[in-house]
Image (cartoon, grey):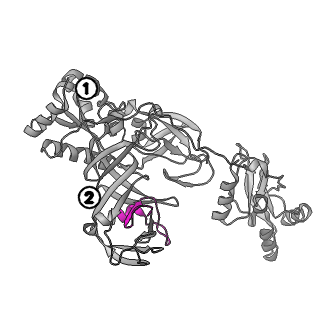
């Protein structure tokens, strides 16, 4: 048994034994658990991944004459104002109001740390004590009174592995997912992850001093969506942005999804007893998560299999009897750098461990959003589809369009599986160009929907792809109907 005071005294004298979580594994393997518990004082952990629930509170000081800011933009990114007159919160997932929307709040924070000037524009409804209606100025990080990194959800204990069963590429917060299980992505650092090394929150709680963004931060409490029962714990953290580094806070844009910020976070875990020593020696092969189908746009996505972080980190995973490429969205290189930097701080006596003033809850019940409005699905609006085959002539399809008063005809094979689609415009264009074969005018890359897809998602597909109808298919890709923009309206 050790105490925080004893360990901090050893840190002060320069006698503390500090190792990273990866080094702890080898020590336990080579010397045994009891020796490791006796000899090691602190284990450092690290993570470096996209943390969408991140942001910063900024205070600009008062202008002359004063302004009570109502709407605030930083480098064209709309910040939240609902605070005092000249305070704002810039969220990392908020994107610029200007195209191409690849710059967001995370980039603003990174630019602040790089010392770049940030353009501030704000408008006001004016009051007697705040008469200024609009302000347009430039500031740097040093010009601010306070800049507080404040992340309501950080350092997830683990993440699922994402893949895509559909026929089209999809773009998500888990990155670009190729069709037909073409790849898989995951996040988290496994055995180096802070919450994997102290899953019962014995040393991680309110007031715990941590490495945050290259500076010192603190745990404020449990993170939003904290779900320890399912091993999805999370942390609410804060720190002084002025002490941090752009090396550990990076703005990022996920293609066709949005912006975020990569955050470097590390937590020191004091080895107070044998149990903590054992937990800090956890291996990737003992950390499980699930492979989930992100092609199904529902809250409860289908779980395809359980998987270990050891298999995830191998670069290929087995799914449906075949190996597919698997890549990480977080940086193991940077996570190791975080853990080693924190280790260095402690060894040099620049960082002391702190006991939490209150432990985090382990029995939190995670609840989904309460829905008071009925969600309608495609099954409620789909209608019968009139199909054709590639060997059918253009004239045959033209007559079918006239006879059935339809503008879209799905093309199927002999098993009624979708292989293309033809529209009345395609027919008109084909006849004008003297085409006779359907194969010469058919669109083979078809955007489709299913009975269980919400109407709003189907409408979004039409809008993004600039089309006016979607074939409806079943699990075997057989055509069972069609839905048009008019049907959705």
Looking at the image, tell me whether mark 2 or mark 1 is earlier in sequence order: 1
Check whether the beta carbons of the residues at disc 2 and disc 1 lie within 8 A of each other: no
For the residue pair 123 and 158, the one nearer the viewer reads as 123
**Residue depicted at x 26% and y 69%:** 143
Q: Residues within 10 Å of mark 2 (few under 14, many from 20)?
A: some
User: Could you say whether the residue bearing mark 1 is in a helix, strand or loop?
Assistant: helix
**Which residues make up the magenta segment?**
80-109
Residue farthest to the front, as pictured: 128
Residue where numbered disc 2 is placed: 245
Seen in the picture, residue 355 relative to 247 is either above or below; the reply is above
Q: In which quarter of the image is the C terminus?
A: bottom right
Q: Quadrant of the N terminus?
A: top left
Q: Distance between the residues labelled 2 and 1?
A: 36 Å
Seen in the picture, residue 406 relative to 8 is either above or below; the reply is below
Seen in the picture, residue 137 relative to 78 is either above or below; the reply is below
Residue 400 in the image: x percent, y percent? 88, 61
Residue 377 in the image: x percent, y percent? 72, 49
Residue 398 in the image: x percent, y percent? 86, 66
| Quarter-of-image position of residue 266 | top left
Assess whether residue 279 is covered by the magenta stretch: no
Q: On the picture, is 191 further left or further right than 444?
A: left
User: Could you say whether the residue bearing mark 2 is in a helix, strand or loop?
Assistant: loop
**Total residue callouts:** 2
Q: Can residue 479 be seen in this view?
A: no
Chief SS of the magenta region:
loop
**Residue depicted at x 81% and y 75%:** 434
Q: Residue 29 carries which label?
A: 1
**Residue depicted at x 89% and y 60%:** 404
Residue 69 in the image: x percent, y percent? 42, 70
For the residue pair 340 and 227, the one nearer the viewer reads as 227
**Residue depicted at x 76% and y 47%:** 379
């Amino acid at each position: 048994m050790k105490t925080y005071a004893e360990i901090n005294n050893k840190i002060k004298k320069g006698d503390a034994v500090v190792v990273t979580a990866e080094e702890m594994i080898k020590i336990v393997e080579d010397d045994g658990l009891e020796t490791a518990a006796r000899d090691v004082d602190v284990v450092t952990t690290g993570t470096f991944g996209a943390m969408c629930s991140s942001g910063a509170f900024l205070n600009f000081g008062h202008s002359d004459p004063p302004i009570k800011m109502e709407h605030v933009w930083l480098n064209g990114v709309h910040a939240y104002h609902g605070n005092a007159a000249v305070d704002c919160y810039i969220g990392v997932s908020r994107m610029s109001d200007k195209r191409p929307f690849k710059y967001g709040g995370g980039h603003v924070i990174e630019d602040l740390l790089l010392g770049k000037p940030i353009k501030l524009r704000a408008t006001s409804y004016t009051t007697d004590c705040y008469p200024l209606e609009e302000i347009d100025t430039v500031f740097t990080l040093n010009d601010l009174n306070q800049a507080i990194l404040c992340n309501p959800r950080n350092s997830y204990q683990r993440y699922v592995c994402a893949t895509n069963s559909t026929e089209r590429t999809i773009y998500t917060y888990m990155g670009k997912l190729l069709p037909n299980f073409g790849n898989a992505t995951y996040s988290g650092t496994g055995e180096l992850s802070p919450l994997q090394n102290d899953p019962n929150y014995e040393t991680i709680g309110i007031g715990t001093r941590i490495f945050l963004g290259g500076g010192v931060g603190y745990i404020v409490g449990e993170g939003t969506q904290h779900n320890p029962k399912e091993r999805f714990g999370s942390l609410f953290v804060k720190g002084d942005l002025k002490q941090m580094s752009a090396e550990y806070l990076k703005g990022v844009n996920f293609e066709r999804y949005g912006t975020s910020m990569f955050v470097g976070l590390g937590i020191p875990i004091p080895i107070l007893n044998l149990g903590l020593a054992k937990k800090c020696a956890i291996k990737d092969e003992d950390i499980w998560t699930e492979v989930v189908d992100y092609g199904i746009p529902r809250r409860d996505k289908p779980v395809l299999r359980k998987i270990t972080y050891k298999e995830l980190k191998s670069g290929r995973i087995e799914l449906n009897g075949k190996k597919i490429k698997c890549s990480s969205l977080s940086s193991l290189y940077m996570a190791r750098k975080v853990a080693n930097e924190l280790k260095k701080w402690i060894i040099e006596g620049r960082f002391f461990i702190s006991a939490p003033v209150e432990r985090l809850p382990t029995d939190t019940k995670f609840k989904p959003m309460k829905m008071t409005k009925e969600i309608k699905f495609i099954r409620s609006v789909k209608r019968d589809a009139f199909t054709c085959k590639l060997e059918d002539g253009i004239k045959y399809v033209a007559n079918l369009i006239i006879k059935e008063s339809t503008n879209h005809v799905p093309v199927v094979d002999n098993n009624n599986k979708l292989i293309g689609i033809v529209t009345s415009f395609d027919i008109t264009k084909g006849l004008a160009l003297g085409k006779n074969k359907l194969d010469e005018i058919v669109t083979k890359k078809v955007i489709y929907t299913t009975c269980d897809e919400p109407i709003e998602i189907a409408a979004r597909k039409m809008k993004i792809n600039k089309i006016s109808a979607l074939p409806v298919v079943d699990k075997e890709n057989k055509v069972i109907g069609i839905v048009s923009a008019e049907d959705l309206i």
